[in-house]
Image (cartoon, rainbow, N blue to C red):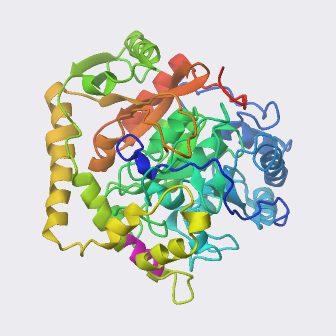
Amino acid sequence: MNHNMHSRRDFLKTAALASLPLSLEYAAHAQTNPPAAPARAPHRGLEEATIAELQLAMSSGKETALSLTKKYLRRIKELDASGPTLRAVIELNPDALEIARDLDRERKQKGPRGKLHGVPVLIKDNIATHDRMMTTAGSLALVGSIAPKDSHVAQKLREAGAVILGKSNLSEWANYRGNRSTSGWSGRGGQTKNPYALDRNPSGSSSGSAAAVAASLCAVAVGTETDGSIISPSAVCGVVGIKPTVGLVSRSGIIPISRTQDTAGPMARTVTDAAILLGALAGSDSQDEATQNSNVVAGFDYTSSLDVNGLKDARIGVPTRFFRGASLAADVLRKAHDDMKALGATLVEFDENISNAGDAEGTVLSYEFKAGINEYLAWLGPDAPMHSLQDLIDFNLKNKERELAFFGQEEFEKSQARGPLTDQAYLDALERCRRRSRAEGIDAVMDKYHLDAILGPSGGPAGTTDAVYGDRDVGGSSSPAAVAGYPNITVPAGHVMGLPVGISFFGRAYSEALLLRIAFAYEQGTTHRMAPKFLERIG
């Protein structure tokens, strides 16, 4: 969820609630034009290593999938389970080392499957895997739950040869439970910290995925978004995040909030790596209707779209209302505008409201969550620990000392009171959302001003973690693309007192290739990405 509109859905609790122990003993098409950076062996250990660098190291024999997996596991032990204690990883894959060994044997016998062969990846703990890992959305209610089959996302990663290293922590139930929540907290995983300053919020709900990528606990990660949950944490953790068009990446096997807004997407330290991961994830799935009538081209190489001159002659829309409240990051955003002009873009300001769905979005999500969560729990089968939203509500009440110690479950209760998806109130709200965000929103201004993309602030610098008041509103522009189901990409744009600030590019449905071209040109022309220093606090 977007912590800008619905901050109660981005959690974070400072207190260490009951959490399961995290152990490393779990078994124990063309490249860019020109390339983003020359490939080299991983430097400074694994810090900031790109997929191209990891592949070079494996192809040269300097590293193997097994050695890289061991190194990432060691880094997780040093930075996540101890040291700064980021709590970005909720569970490690007990089969990760054996998977890596198998992929090394395959590389020797047949060569690599592709760019992700042997690359360690983390996925959010609402993305189902049929293995020895649980899928819990961070909730104690689903501890012990093993999915009956892989999600389509997990299946695609395995097919690409990625090593699923483990599950990342998140804002519990993807930040859709109660009011005054704070991002990055889950009952099972505890509090995720922002690696730039440990007292700062990593935002949500894909908090762990963003923090893990920023801290180089993995090569890349997968997050999910309903409204802002990839874009916001990516921005405040200084990484690249892609919220794809709904239907580009399957949602089957992912614990849902909204059938009309949910999507999984890549989180990475570079646009190139995010593009590689997006190509691996995209594809149609018979279990997700949204993918079946889409423009999905399975196996498309999004890196073929990347061009350092991608901003030349591009027309970028600037919705002035999104930038008025961005005072803390005003200098960063002004510099971003100047940089884009210097890189050849034409910026076109407009004041039309492209996110005018009002309360309709909340109504849609409230109806869809109940329908979606009941369907997911039924998919788990009769032996699942929970079978309905009401069961979850009852569990939380019985375990309120651990689950409800800091905030309640008002969103759960509101959703439980909703009727079926045939209710006129739901149908009217859904129609308003789609019309206001699409025909009268993004599509309208792009047609009127002949735009290639729309620019927005991804949000301001991270606020402090606050278990009493909950999340601080740091602004953002995620809602138009989220409500429309259109793509959105955030890229690092600078820093405020050492804290990252991001800029977003969004546009029409299935315009990922164009947006990546623009985002890559901005990234390469500015190079704002800076590794975190794990400061205790700012100032």
Q: Position of residue 233 (x, y in %)?
A: 52, 41
Picture coordinates of residue 211 (x, y %)? 63, 42
Q: Residue furthest bottom?
A: 382
Residue in view at x 68 percent, y 44 percent: 219
Q: Is residue 161 above or below residue 202?
A: below
| Residue 138 in the figure: left or right of residue 56 | left
Q: Is residue 65 above or below residue 211?
A: below
Q: Residue at x 38, y 23 (%)?
A: 326
Q: Looking at the image, which residue is at 34% across and 72% down?
A: 416
Q: Is residue 194 visible?
A: yes
Q: Is residue 116 left or right of residue 183?
A: right
Front-most of 25 and 280?
25
Q: How many marks?
A: 0
The spot of residue 107 in percent (x, y) is 76, 56
The image shows residue 297 at horizontal and vertical percentages of: 40, 54
Residue 27 quadrant: bottom right
Residue segment shown in magenta: 372-377
103 to 328, vertically: above or below = below
Q: Nearer the viewer, residue 336 or 406?
A: 406
| Principal secondary structure, stretch drawn in magenta | helix
> Which residue is at a point 80% across and 48% down the rendered structure image?
68
| Front-lying residue, 491 or 256 | 256
Can residue 289 be seen in the rendering of this structure?
A: no
Q: Indicate whether residue 183 is drawn in magenta.
A: no
Question: Where's the C terminus, which quadrant?
Answer: top right
From this view, report whether residue 381 is shown above or below residue 89: below
- 344 to the left or right of 28: left
**Residue 309 or residue 197, whichever sits in front:** 197
